[in-house]
Image: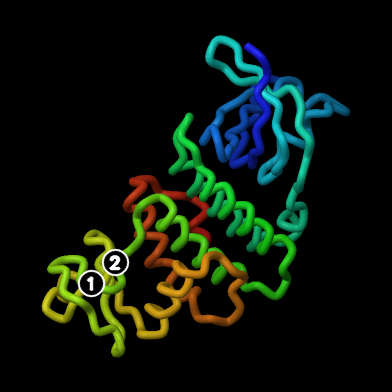
Amino acid sequence: MPAITTPGIVLRFANYRDHDRMLTLLSPRLGRVDLLSRGCRRPKSPLMPASELFVSGEFVLFLKNERAVLTSCALQDTFYPLRLDPYRLTCASYMAGLCAAAVQPGQPAEDLYALLLKGLYYLSYDGDADPLETTTAFVLLFADATGYRPRLSRCAHCRTPLDVSGGGHMDISAGGLCCPACASRATFPVTHEQIVWMSRTIREGLTPQKNTGAGMLFDMLRRYVESRLETPIKAGRLLP
């Protein structure tokens, strides 16, 4: 079978045998790709730069017996500044962990690929962007991209239109805000400003967050998306 060339981002890796690595790649066309980077840990291996976490580029893969092997990569970005800031590195690891848990092999993931690239860029190169708030926006948009957008305009239980001028209550299990009659089932209070922020973020997409107060929503949104994925993401326990 001929080689396949695809854009990709390395979501995680695991050392394998003496000189190899197993990589998990996020491809916009192919979804999750698990592949072998053979010999990348040997001194001066040309594959080593492409076998690190968060690296993005054009990956050339050879498929044989339903296994993918990395043959070369034209690097686009290594997002190296993340490695100089442990907190931003943890935020980026959480973003990548969510994508690794959600994307399936052979399932196109154009939206998640673009979202993760943008998130890594802001964490790496926008020193003024608050890392937790930017990650919070990423988590909300991740929920939207994977089909789990929280209900913000109607009660998640009875579907009654909501008046959020005085804030509201979020029910994680039901998937959105609740009206006063159903609020006893809710678990997280949210302010009017936070609801406005969530609506605006879903509408406008990911931007570098700077002192918006969005970080106060991180734990709620983390619990929300992980309950949908049914998978805890370890890096999230280190935040905020």
Q: Position of residue 115 (x, y in %)?
A: 56, 55
Packing grade of label 1 (10 A; few <14, some 14-19, many >=20) is some
Q: Which residue is mark 1?
A: 154
Q: Is residue 15 above or below residue 228?
A: above
User: What residue do we see at 61% from left, 59% from top?
Assistant: 119
Q: Position of residue 83 (x, y in %)?
A: 73, 54
Q: Secondary structure at mark 2?
A: loop
Q: Amino acid at mark 1?
A: Arg
User: What residue do we see at 54% from left, 45% from top?
Assistant: 110
- Label disc, if present, on residue 45 of the rendered structure: none
Query: Is residue 240 something that shows in the picture?
Result: no
Q: Position of residue 71 (x, y in %)?
A: 74, 22
Quarter in which the N terminus is drawn: top right
Q: In the displayed structure, does residue 101 sit left or right of residue 51?
A: left
Packing grade of label 2 (10 A; few <14, some 14-19, many >=20) is some
Q: 199 or 38: nearer the eye?
A: 199
Q: Is residue 41 above or below residue 145?
A: above
Q: 176 or 24: nearer the eye?
A: 176
Q: Amino acid at mark 2?
A: Arg
User: What residue do we see at 23% from left, 72% from top?
Assistant: 154
Write down the quadrant of residue 13 in the picture.
top right
Q: Which residue is mark 2?
A: 151
- Dots 1, 2 in contact, CB < 8 A: yes
User: What residue do we see at 52% from left, 53% from top?
Assistant: 235
Q: Secondary structure at mark 1?
A: loop
Query: Is residue 57 something that shows in the picture?
Result: yes
